[in-house]
Image: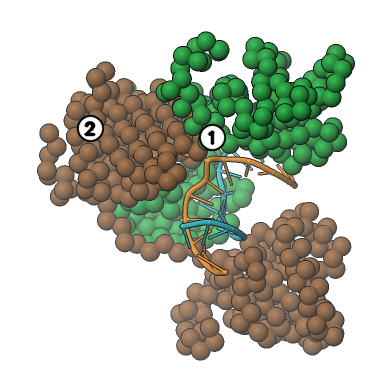
Chain colours: A green, B brown, C orange, D cyan
DNA sequence: CCTTTCAGTTAGTTA
DNA sequence: TAACTAAGTGAAAGG
């Protein structure tokens, strides 16, 4: 029933399929770990950690290559029903000429059944996606923002060496002075954990051996993990929360208004 | 460019569209609050509470009737990028013959831009979905089930106050008597953890200060976490497993057979 | 492998 | 509207 040509096309469509055609296309997609989209009128039953029922209506069903499943209504950006990756999938026609789709998750055992009354469209997709995903306002961006607007760390903070740049293991440090004139060591990271605190501690040790006046150690990060907080206090270090949103605004401002300053300094 | 026939069909397809055709079809779908699906090779930039970039790759993009937007990779059951309902949508061709899709959320301001290199398929959907969704066996439902069939907690258990309803922090408690005539405090939750046990402990403290006879504290829940079990014993509390499936059957029975009782009592 | 914590959490409810 | 809390939370990091 299923055209083998689907292997060569990025999108293989079956419009207004019979129940048998839809089941066949889906079974084929499941076995080949392809992405499948079903658009039609369906009802859904779920039983597992909780249980739910969804009455008849038009929905968009997506089965992904990893065996995850999503059912979307026309509104609401979250799926009304879903099943996470790795569940067992099976599609078959029923005696009442409906398309039955069963997705079983083991551990915890959760069973989802979808019954399609009408199937408007089945699309089997061969999607190639190796693109890298990156959540920005990285350490580097945060550093740029702090250098441009040091007050987000502390009022009166003045960075001194902008060229210390990357320490080992990807940390970026900023040296500077506070209002009392004490040297300040800066280290910031995205979600500061124990390693970040220990890293700063080791850094401070090294610096205190050379510099003969009090040195404060401050971690500037969007958040500080619970376990890191204890360690921070034990080592006598400080923490300063940094809003990534704020960094972002600073950078955008600096990019649009004072590009020349950055070209000179950085 | 866009065939007006799309209004009459549940699914209106544009295969291998030109950039102009795709943009036109999408703009039309946006204005009519239809659901649109785009399959193609794209890259994504997001800026808002955080910021992210996603390099080129084949993805499934869905725009819903309420202006929400989802971008799904071939794997992973969560969207790689998204935009919640109510954002401003715009689709247009770029000078580099790419399809640019812009989704702006106001408050907080978040901007997402999708660039399609190749568009394999645009589908505009007219989905009619009035089906009711019901999550069975929530805390409230479990409470109703226990009040209707108290023996699932303990043989001879008799609820006294059905109107205590929601305690602070969303917990629902049931007070009653057991066969020895002792007062019994009930607290049930879906997967009982430490917080639930501590909550019950605090509750019991308060009650023991007022009531001058022994009070048992029982947690009724589908399961009890390992760490919560230790705490439970330390505090001298009890645990009674509750089957959600059983609650569901009880409620279904009560709904079909004894609706009048519930109208009187609840 | 289990537990804890974070998330562009989202979504619902209450003050 | 803001604050709080639960979620079929999911996902990553720590022990």
Give left or right: position of B19 versus B168. Answer: left
Q: Is residue A22 above or below residue A196?
A: below
Which picture quadrant has residue A211?
top right
Tag 1 subunit: A
Q: Position of residue A185 (x, y in %)?
A: 74, 23
- Badge 1: residue crowd in 10 Å (few <14, some 14–19, many ≥20): some
The residue that label 2 is drawn on is: B23
Nearest the viewer among B30 and A266 is A266
Report whether A249 appears left or right of A93.
Answer: right
Query: Badge 2, how many Cα within 10 Å: few under 14, some, many 20+?
Result: many
**Which residue extends farthest front?**
A180
Quarter of the view holding residue A259:
top left
Q: What chain does badge 2 belong to?
A: B
Whether residue A94 is visible, yes or no, is: no
Residue at horizontal 62 percent and vertical 82 percent from the top: B162
Where B251 sits versus B116, above or below?
below
Residue B199 at x, y percent in the picture = 73, 65
Circle nearer the viewer, 2 or 1: 1
Image disc number at residue A246? 1
């Amino acid at each position: 029933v299923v055209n083998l040509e689907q292997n060569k096309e990025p999108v293989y469509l079956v419009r207004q399929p019979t129940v048998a055609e839809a089941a066949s296309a889906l079974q084929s997609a499941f076995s080949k770990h392809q992405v499948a989209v079903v658009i039609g009128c369906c009802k859904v039953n779920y039983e597992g950690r909780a249980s739910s029922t969804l009455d008849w209506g038009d929905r968009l069903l997506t089965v992904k290559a990893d065996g995850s499943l999503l059912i979307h209504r026309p509104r609401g950006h979250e799926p009304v029903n879903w099943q996470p990756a790795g569940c067992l999938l099976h599609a078959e026609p029923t005696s009442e000429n409906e398309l039955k789709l069963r997705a079983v998750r083991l551990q915890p055992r959760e069973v989802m059944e979808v019954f399609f009354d009408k199937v408007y469209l089945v699309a089997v997709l061969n999607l190639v996606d190796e693109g890298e995903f990156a959540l920005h306002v990285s350490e580097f961006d945060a550093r740029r923002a702090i250098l441009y607007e040091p007050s987000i760390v502390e009022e009166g903070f003045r960075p001194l060496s902008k060229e210390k740049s990357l320490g080992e293991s990807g940390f970026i440090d900023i040296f500077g002075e506070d209002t009392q004139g004490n040297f300040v060591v800066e280290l910031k990271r995205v979600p500061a954990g124990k390693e970040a605190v220990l890293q700063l501690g080791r850094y401070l040790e090294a610096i205190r051996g050379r510099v003969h006046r009090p040195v404060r150690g401050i971690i500037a990060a969007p958040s500080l993990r619970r376990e890191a907080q204890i360690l921070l206090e034990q080592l006598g270090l400080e923490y300063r929360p940094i809003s990534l949103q704020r960094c972002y605004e600073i950078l955008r401002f600096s990019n649009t208004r004072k590009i020349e300053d950055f070209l000179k300094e950085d």
